[in-house]
Amino acid sequence: MTNLNIRRVAGALGAEITGVDLSKDLADETIAEIRRALVEHQVIFFRDQDLTPERQAAFGRRFGPLNIHPYVSGMAGQPEVMEIIKEPSDRINFGGGWHSDMSFLRTPSIGSILYAVELPEYGGDTLFASQAAAYDALSDGLKATLDGLNAVHSASREYAATGASAQKRGSMQVAAEADGYVGEYVHPMVLTHPETGRKALYVNPAFTMKIEGWKTSESKALLEYLFQHSRYEAFTCRFAWAKGSVAFWDNRSVWHFALNDYPGQRRHMRRVTVDPWPQAASVPAAAE
């Protein structure tokens, strides 16, 4: 029996967990309960944590191997730990648009764990949107159509020289050009969660390029409809950070959006991203 207290924070997704110190070597039973909460609530939050980069990485590894981002340099000696920093002089923030982390990879991540190190005096909240709730709200006809479709994902647009994620920042080393580095990969437009069996939309504005087998122009209308539908307020929750807060979200069913509403202030977060245990990967997209 654990001492966790789990409190839902919104209708579609989100729960806050108290009664646990993530810096400790947690029992398997506690990790299993946290994982159950993650897959049930899709994003979970913890307050008043004191995590070194080493302890944050150790916590993340309890859920799977850690990802090394192909375009953003990790910490020296700890490439799996990514520092996300917006300096007062930076105009564009990192993650400032709806997206699902790492969907542009052959095998996408299962989740991300973000820790607040330093926060602005105001602003800097993160929005989350349940793609399971978004799928549930679709008509039966559209569900049937999407269930048979795949989409092409790539980092080439977001991490190209003019992309928002590749913009020069004072304290982050981000690659200036990503075209062709990772390539394009195909994933189902509707993802069945391997742990719950619940279906969720799996497209996002940052990394989904088009529907497989369709022209880009043919794909645009349907994808734009899904992007608009998927951010509907009833599918979302909003997290107000404080120093020591942690958010752990399921990239298989959740979008997120880091708000950029704190001009002239500094925001410093640390992220580790959890990959799935080795399994069959998605196939590369066919060249056109």
Image (cartoon, grey):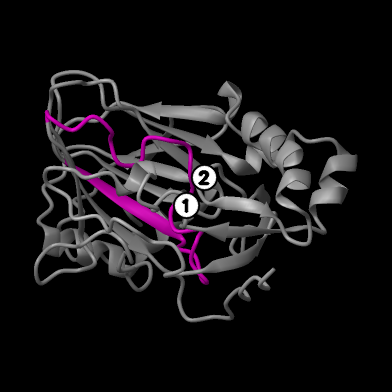
Type of amino acid at the residue the image marks with label 2: Val
Q: Was residue 162 drawn as part of the magenta stretch in this picture?
A: no
Let me know if residue 105 is in the magenta part: yes
Separation of disc 1 and disc 2 at Cα?
6 Å
Give SS at disc 2: strand
Toward the viewer: 209 or 228? 209
Q: Which residues are magenta?
A: 88-116
Above or below, 24 relative to 68: above
Q: Dividing the picture into quarters, in which one does residue 61 lie?
A: bottom left
Q: Is residue 55 left or right of residue 137?
A: left
Instruction: Work out which quarter of the rendered image holds the N terminus and state it.
Output: bottom left
Q: Position of residue 43 (x, y in %)?
A: 44, 43
Density class for disc 1 (Cα within 10 Å; few <14, some 14-19, many ≥20) is many
Q: Main secondary structure of the magenta part?
A: loop
Q: Is residue 17 left or right of residue 73?
A: right
- Residue, disc 2: 254
Amino acid type, mark 1: Asp
Query: Which residue is disc 1 drawn over?
Result: 250
* Badge 1 vs badge 2, beta-carbon distance below 8 Å: yes
